[in-house]
Amino acid sequence: MNLDIQPLAVHRTSPNQHRSISGWMRWLAVAVLAAAALPAPARSLQDIHASGELRICVAGSSAPLYQANGEAFARFLQVKPIVIPLAAFDEQFHNEEGRTVEDASYEPRLLANGSCDVFPNDLHVAPWRESKMQIVPYYTVRKVIVARSALRGKIHSASDLGGLKAAVQDGTTYNTWLEKLNTGELAQNRVVVVHAATENSVRQVADAQADFTVLGTDGALKWVRADPTRLSILFPVDESVSVGWGIPKSSPALATELKRFFDDSARVGSDLDRNWQSYYKISLTEYQLFQASFDTKGIDLKTVLAWAAPIVMVFLALLVILLTWSLRNAVRHKKSTEALRQNLEATIDAIAATVESRDPYTAGHQRRVAQLGVAIAREMGLPEEQVQGIRLAATIHDLGKIQIPAEILSKPGRLSEIEFMLVQTHPKAGYNILKDVKFPWPIPDIVLQHHERQDGSGYPQGLKDEQILLESKIIAVADVIEAIASNRPYRPALGIDVALQEIERYRGEKYDPKVVDACIKLFREFGFKLPS
């Protein structure tokens, strides 16, 4: 068989052309390899929704809390949570070389390559961190010294820490604060610093293996409440700073959703609120109050009221409506005004019952104080209009206690200093709730002053004698009588005789003499009895 085989046509290139093509191919290969080596860009909110998953990277000793909170955010976004534990807390800030460089601006490797969408690790906002990521805040914190209880009363400021031993977690702002202290104020008498995870650091302090540690008020509250006999919170060492979650700077839409999540969580019973309760044994609501106790400016009522129980807010709104309506129609409609006034009194009674329902040991306390206060005022011959103002003020004089953790109000033992500090905020808290309501009587000021004393030893303002409203002086005496004569979580009732001896002993010193005399006369001459 003859096969007619035609040779393949061969295209020949010149040497110059060959070199040109080879160079182009080498360049293309290098470009492909370089592109393959480049990290994937940080994921956007659109990417998160498209993949159906949120990559949550947790680190630190509180990782269980951070994971629970991150998973709550994933549910908010309606995507699946993918939880990635980090090897070290510092890994959140590592660059491509696996190092944290505080004075360099870059996007951390785990955010930049899409491994992590969010760091829900309650990061303290600091300029060096903000140069690497966007931190969306949701609460504030202060650094405090937590020491073994034996040192309480011996350490009053940072200057007293020199020569002591501190256990603290490395890579945290607490360790950074100690480093600055050792190179500055205590350079000649440095703190001996050992590094350990937060839980181990606290344990070393409790076991007297270290003298103190540095924590945020959130962690400090948890650990000291768990071991109050061996640990004490001494003092804050800085101003309040914001705390939040880290996300890529290139994800503004994700930041918006995270802010919406925090706003939605600003209520009793939210996932964040319950997670805090489970982990810290105190809800986020109650933590806000604890943190505020360190603030010399007082409680931020806007924040507190945003977390207050909805039922109380309903009552307060109703109170404002009734008062406004009543005063507006006072001149023209005397008859309907009287009916509205009765409704107002019923509303105030309901508010009082709501406050007292949180503490079964003092149920009825405000009502009994009001009845005794009214009796004292009438015995003193005060005008009936003034008497009615005393009754209403006394009925809600402890309104501010709605913001005090229930376990403190019903604690069977002695209150710690911090717990007592929280309790002492209730007159001001009550005043702030009531101050914008236009009462016919100075009820907000009466509530504010009901723990003031003649000699200036009271709170919250330390007022003396004539600086204190007469109505507040009357409620103060009635309050003391009822408290001593009734059962309390920490002791049984002491009886009316002991109560009367108390006000007799401090007549003219703590309590107004005329008020004391009228009160004693009621019980000893007229046989007045506190209602059951």
Image: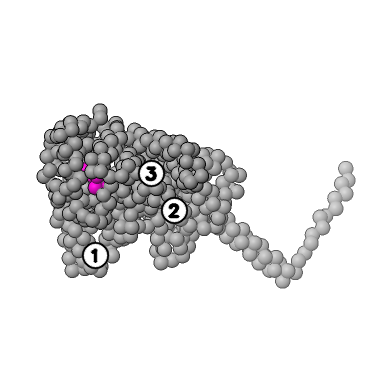
Give the left or right position of residue 299, taking residue 516 as reference. right
Q: Give the answer, above or below, for where 58 lies relative to 409.
A: below
Image coordinates of residue 234 in percent, x first then y, are: 22, 53
Type of colouring: one colour
Residue stretch rendered in magenta on the structure:
472-477
The disc placed on residue 182 is: 1
Nearer the N terminus, badge 3 or badge 1?
Answer: 1
Image coordinates of residue 448 in percent, x first then y, are: 31, 50
Q: Which residue is mark 3?
A: 285
Q: CA distance from mark 2 to mark 3?
A: 16 Å
Callout 1 secondary element: helix
As drawn, which residue projects farthest toward the top? 532
Quadrant of image for the C terminus: top left
User: Residue drawn 81% across and 55% down?
Assistant: 8
Tag 2 and tag 3, C-beta contact below 8 Å? no
Give the left or right position of residue 343, taking residue 234 as reference. right
Nearer the N terminus, badge 1 or badge 2?
Answer: 2
Callout 2 secondary element: strand
Q: Nearer the viewer, residue 282 or 492?
A: 492
- Badge 3 crowding class, 10 Å Cα cut-off, few under 14, some 14 to 19, many 20 or more, is many
Residue 11 figure quarter: bottom right
Q: Nearer the viewer, residue 299 or 341?
A: 341
Image coordinates of residue 496 in percent, x first then y, are: 16, 34
Q: Give the answer, above or below, for where 384 lies relative to 43.
A: above
The disc placed on residue 137 is: 2
Q: Is residue 302 magenta?
A: no
Give the left or right position of residue 489, taking residue 276 as reference. left
